[in-house]
């Protein structure tokens, strides 16, 4: 069916602009604040919902209920709602994986870590032995995308993901920011960063190298 709508997509990336996540998010926020008519639809990461939410329309007032119900309501409720407004629809879901260096784990008789505490202990053990036995000081115990760049707010995404891993069960929703789970997650994140992690060595190459490369 031809509904007579033409879409012009403006994609900003590292290949066509001086790309920085901070600059990109600030640009969108500025356009929304000014109620600029430049764009009709925005694609944005759900981690920015609190920044953009105040300026976005409530899609419940524009879309039929049967269309909204096409989407997983659990995902909708956790990622698309701001102050009881439906300010977006999920286009894609991304998953972060924790990779292990099997060769080093086997070499030192260690198993793949199943918890953050196990990862901390395993990474410390292997890093110390690699340094003492082979003078290897370049080993990354854990890199959870802790950016060292002032213009890069991708580290916020890492915080959200880390906190989510501390929810009570697989089916639990995102923990409240003032909950004990959230506090424990940030304490563990701080410990990992201080004891076995490095800063983000390169914005694009070292994006998700999590253990012992």
Image: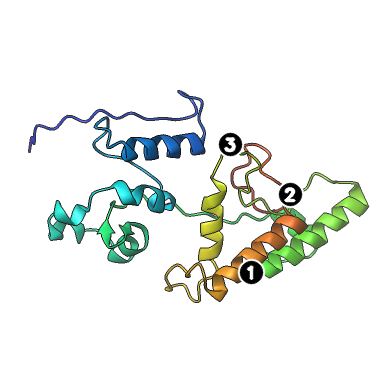
Q: Secondary structure at mark 2?
A: loop
**At 31% across and 59% down in the image, what residue appears?**
81
Between 14 and 20, the residue placed more toward the observer is 20
Q: Are marks 1 and 3 in contact (CB under 8 Å)?
A: no
Counting labels gives: 3
Bin the neighbour count of mark 2 within 10 Å (Cα to Cα): few under 14, some 14-19, many 20 and up.
some
- Distance from Cα at disc 2 to Cα at disc 3: 16 Å
Q: Residues within 10 Å of mark 3 (few under 14, many from 20)?
A: few
Circle 2 residue: 140
Q: Is residue 98 above or below residue 184?
A: above
Q: Considering the numbered disc 1 on the image, is that residue within a helix, a strand or a loop?
A: loop
- In the picture, the disc for residue 148 is none
Residue at image position (28%, 52%) is 87
- Residue 78 is situated, as x and y percent measured from the top left of the image, at 36, 63
Point out the tag, 2 or 3, that comes first from the N-terminus: 2
**150 over 79 or under it: above or below:** above
Tell me the number on the disc at residue 115: 1
Would residue 60 be visible to someone looking at this image?
A: yes
Q: Earlier in the sequence, mark 1 or mark 3?
A: 1
Q: Quadrant of residue 109?
A: bottom right
Q: Nearer the viewer, residue 201 or 50?
A: 50
Residue sitting at the far top = 16
Percent of width and height locating residue 144: 62, 52
Q: Residue at horizontal 84%, vertical 46%?
A: 137
Q: Quadrant of residue 100?
A: bottom right
Inter-mark Cα distance, 1 to 2? 18 Å
């Amino acid at each position: 069916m031809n509904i007579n709508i033409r879409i012009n997509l403006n994609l900003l990336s590292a290949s066509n602009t001086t790309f920085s996540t901070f600059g990109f998010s600030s640009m969108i926020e500025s356009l929304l604040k000014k109620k600029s008519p430049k764009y009709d639809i925005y694609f944005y990461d759900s981690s920015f919902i609190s920044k953009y939410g105040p300026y976005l329309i409530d899609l419940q007032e524009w879309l039929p209920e049967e269309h909204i119900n096409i989407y997983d309501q659990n995902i909708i409720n956790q990622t698309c709602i701001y102050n009881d407004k439906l300010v977006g629809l999920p286009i894609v879901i991304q998953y972060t994986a924790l990779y292990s260096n099997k060769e080093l784990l086997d070499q030192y008789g260690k198993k793949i870590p199943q918890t953050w505490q196990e990862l901390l202990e395993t990474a410390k053990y292997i890093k110390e032995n690699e340094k003492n036995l082979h003078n290897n000081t370049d080993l990354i115990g854990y890199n959870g995308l802790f950016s060292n760049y002032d213009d890069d707010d991708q580290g916020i995404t890492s915080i959200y993901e880390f906190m989510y891993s501390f929810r009570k069960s697989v089916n639990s929703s995102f923990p409240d920011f003032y909950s004990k789970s959230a506090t424990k997650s940030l304490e563990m994140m701080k410990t990992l960063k201080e004891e076995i992690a490095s800063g983000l060595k390169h914005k694009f190459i070292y994006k998700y190298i999590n253990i012992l490369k």
